[in-house]
Image: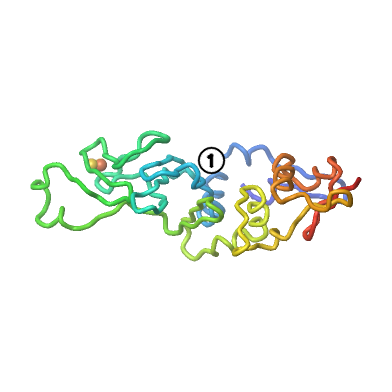
Amino acid sequence: MDLRDLVVEDAKNATFRVHRSTMTSPEILELERKFIFDRSWLYVGHESEVTKPGDYVRRTVAGRPLFMAHGRDGKVRVFINSCLHRGALVCRTDTGNAGSFVCFYHGWAYDDCGKLIGIPDPDGYAKGFCETERRLIEPPHVDNYRGMYFVNFGSAVPTLAEFLGEARELIAILVGGVNNNEATPLDRWNVSVQSRPTIDFHDARTLISANRASQDCSRLGFELTREKAVLRS
Ligand code: FES
């Protein structure tokens, strides 16, 4: 398979074709995993999904089983959903609240911060084994922007801020919570019209959120620019 044959882009003849095998081929999926998903920041969930200590959500991200939990120490973490013993799932429901996660296989228990807190029949293990602190594995890179949690499984990776680039501006509008102390370029956006000097940021956000893209705003009579959005009245 020559990958170059799968996409035909010929602007002169107004042709852009993608071979349908790119949507079905296991080989291409593997290549995508290797060259895209294994080195990109991937979205896991939003902090509003786990507002209280013990709250958790389970996710499969790029084929990997994960869960995100709000620990009793107030920190939100993302874990590989795999027991340290023999790899069984430790979080077995999609969402809920739990002070601990108990592996169904041999009963190893972890608290909501990922710490191994219980092993049945500890005498059956090597001396000192149960005294050593162990924790569920976290992906090598976890970060959040405006409460949106991402993971990256690569080794040398850009920061989340670098990876998101100007997309951060759109995220800032979509999720709100604008804080002047951490203003991004897009926080400067506003919507104005002569008869109504300023529509507050919430209004602008609602419109953009409802329409998903700035070009759609024009249908409502808006022009959206980096510095400001102006109502055409
Ligand atoms: S695999 Fe989890 S306790 Fe054995």
Q: How many marks?
A: 1
Residue 196, percent from left and from top:
84, 49
Q: Is residue 139 left or right of residue 8?
A: left
Q: Residue at x 36, y 43 (%)?
A: 54
**Residue displayed at 24% across by 50% down:** 116
Q: Quadrant of residue 94?
A: top left
Q: Nearer the viewer, residue 159 or 1?
A: 159
Residue 90's quadrant in the figure? top left
Image location of residue 200, percent across then percent down: 73, 50
Residue most extreme to the right: 233
Provide residue 172's location: percent of width, then percent of height: 64, 53
User: In the shown orientation, is residue 196 left or right of residue 121?
Assistant: right
SS under mark 1: helix
Q: According to the image, label 1 marks what residue?
A: 26
> At which x and y percent is residue 195?
88, 49
Q: Nearer the viewer, residue 74 or 148?
A: 74
Which of these two is toward me, 124 or 33? Answer: 124
Compared to residue 66, the image places residue 139 above or below, namely below
Residue type of the residue flagged with mark 1 = Pro
Q: Residues within 10 Å of mark 1 (few under 14, many from 20)?
A: few
Which quadrant would the C terminus be assigned to in this image?
A: top right
Quadrant of res 95: top left
Its colouring scheme is rainbow
